[in-house]
Image (cartoon, coloured by chain):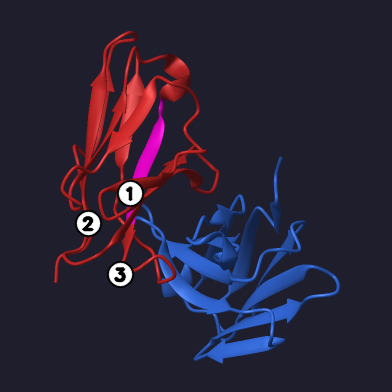
Chain colours: A red, B blue
Amino acid sequence: GAGVSQSPRYKVTKRGQDVALRCDPISGHVSLYWYRQALGQGPEFLTYFNYEAQQDKSGLPNDRFSAERPEGSISTLTIQRTEQRDSAMYRCASSLDWGEVQHFGDGTRLSIL
Amino acid sequence: QQQVKQSPQSLIVQKGGISIINCAYENTAFDYFPWYQQFPGKGPALLIAIRPDVSEKKEGRFTISFNKSAKQFSLHIMDSQPGDSATYFCAASNRNTGFQKLVFGTGTRLLVSP
């Protein structure tokens, strides 16, 4: 079946613009995670959803970052008033349940000019 | 604060050789230690994982060795093949928090020469 799908694959935008990154998890997966991966680094946890409930957002860097999963399936990570330091690969992962294997998408490469 | 330290940063191994990647962690509450394999342009994919109640786990050519007292774990790839060339990440999590908040190492870029 289809894996975790993220869109767009690449996003280039000017500093100060808002961006929305989309994640379509594997069908039936209850848990959804957002990570940020800097070049040459491992993924860093941002936030986690169980169904539509955001259970933990401790990894979000500041209040410009927000995420939602209104119907317990597709999730959107929104960054407002983007800054150059927001440039990174943003990855989404989903799992069948909270303790199960996380399956990662191929990510969205965000570049802020 | 880097909770999982990984080494080496890069590794070159001849085909048929053994690749060894090491990780050390600080948080004694961690109770799940997976290794992820990542190919260029792709997301990380789970390779093998271990719980702290065992000292070793083997799946095919891949083995995790775990030393709880030293707070260290390592990945051994036996008979390394060019197709194993990828970036490998160790990770750790505390499943008692109610979800898998994975903490990743910085990654090891492995190149297996033909």
Identify the element where label 3 is drawn. loop
Mark 2 and mark 1: span between their CA atoms?
A: 8 Å
**Image position, residue B93 (x, y; %):** 58, 62
Horizontal side of B83 relative to B104 (left or right) equals: left
Which three-letter amino acid code belongs to the residue tagged 1? Answer: Cys
Quadrant hosting residue B32: bottom right
Q: Does the residue at mark 2 contact the one at mark 1 (Cβ under 8 Å)?
A: yes
- The magenta stretch spans residue A92: yes
> Mark 1 or mark 3, which is nearer to you?
3
Image point (85%, 70%), residue name: B70
Horizontal side of A32 relative to B83 (left or right) equals: left
Q: Give the residue at mark 3.
A: A96
Q: Is residue B67 visible?
A: yes
**Image position, residue B98 (x, y; %):** 50, 62
Horizontal side of B5 relative to B84 (left or right) equals: right
Which of pointers 2 and 1 lies earlier in the amino acid sequence? 2
Residue A92: which disc?
Answer: 1
In the depicted structure, whether residue B55 falls above or below residue B32: below
Mark 2 and mark 3: span between their CA atoms?
A: 10 Å
Residue A25: which disc?
Answer: 2
Which three-letter amino acid code belongs to the residue tagged 3? Answer: Leu
Q: What type of secondary structure mainly makes up the magenta span? A: strand
**Image position, residue A55 (x, y; %):** 41, 48
Identify the element where label 2 is drawn. loop
Which sits in the foreground, B97 or B105?
B97
Image point (33%, 29%), residue name: A110
Mark 1 and mark 3: span between their CA atoms?
A: 14 Å
